Image (spheres, rainbow, N blue to C red):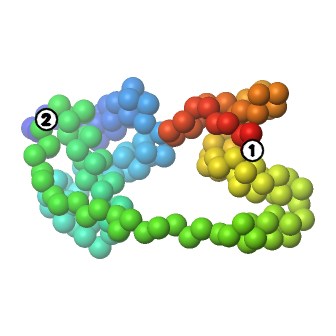
Amino acid sequence: MDGRDESTADYTKKLSEELRLRKYSGQTGKAYLSIVNAFIRSGLQPRGFLLGQLDKSRSSMRSFYFSLKFFYENVLKQNFDEEIPLAKNKGKLPIVLSKEEVMRMIDTTLNIKHRLVLSFLYYSGIRLNELINIKWEDIDFDRGIIHLKTAKLRNLLNIST
């Protein structure tokens, strides 16, 4: 890569440290480590490695590209000059259920815990991952708010209707 005589384990350790220092999620860290390890084992240059991934999805190609870019810039401390046109997602609109469909889904769910989860997701508008991480003390019933400590874009959600 850059002429240094470092092992894959050394690079993996440095990459892992950099990802943690920058507070990347565990899933992103796993993905980057896997991709960079495959890249190092391949012995190819970045462009050749990326060209070998053309059968992958748009999203996967972007992950491969940004993994290598992060590795070069933050671990190897080298410029990543590879300019590969990255296809953007098509921007499909999500399928939105009608209010009646949602109510039917909630009403036909027999397990009370599952019903609670579905109702909570629907009425609060939070993501499943945000709901999974909510603790009882995060809910302020008097003020009608939920404090989301792991939210992506927002930290406080008003649940009053």
**Residue 112 in which image quadrant:** bottom right
- The reply to whether residue 52 is visible in this rendering is yes
Name the disc covering residue 78, or none: 2
Q: Residue furthest front?
A: 161
Where residue 83 appears, as percent x and y from the top left, is 12, 53
At 38% across and 29% down in the image, what residue appears? Answer: 22
Q: Is residue 8 above or below residue 31?
A: above
Image quarter of the N terminus: top left
- The reply to whether residue 140 is visible in this rendering is no
Name the disc covering residue 53, or none: none
**Residue 78 in which image quadrant:** top left
- Identify residue type, mark 2: Gln
- Identify residue type, mark 1: Thr
161 left or right, relative to 79 = right
70 left or right, relative to 144 = left
Where residue 18 appears, as percent x and y from the top left, is 34, 30
Q: Marks 1 and 2, Cα distance to the nearest angstrom?
A: 52 Å
Where residue 134 appears, as percent x and y from the top left, is 71, 37
* Of pointers 1 and 2, the one earlier in the residue sequence: 2
At 12% across and 38% down in the image, what residue appears? Answer: 79
Q: Secondary structure at mark 1?
A: loop
Q: Secondary structure at mark 2?
A: loop
Nearest the eye: 49 or 149: 149
Where residue 73 appears, as percent x and y from the top left, is 20, 36
- Crowding at mark 1 (Cα within 10 Å: few <14, some 14-19, many 20+): few
- Crowding at mark 2 (Cα within 10 Å: few <14, some 14-19, many 20+): some
Pointer 1: what residue?
Answer: 161
At 12% across and 51% down in the image, what residue appears? Answer: 82
User: Looking at the image, how many numbered discs can be counted on the residues?
Assistant: 2
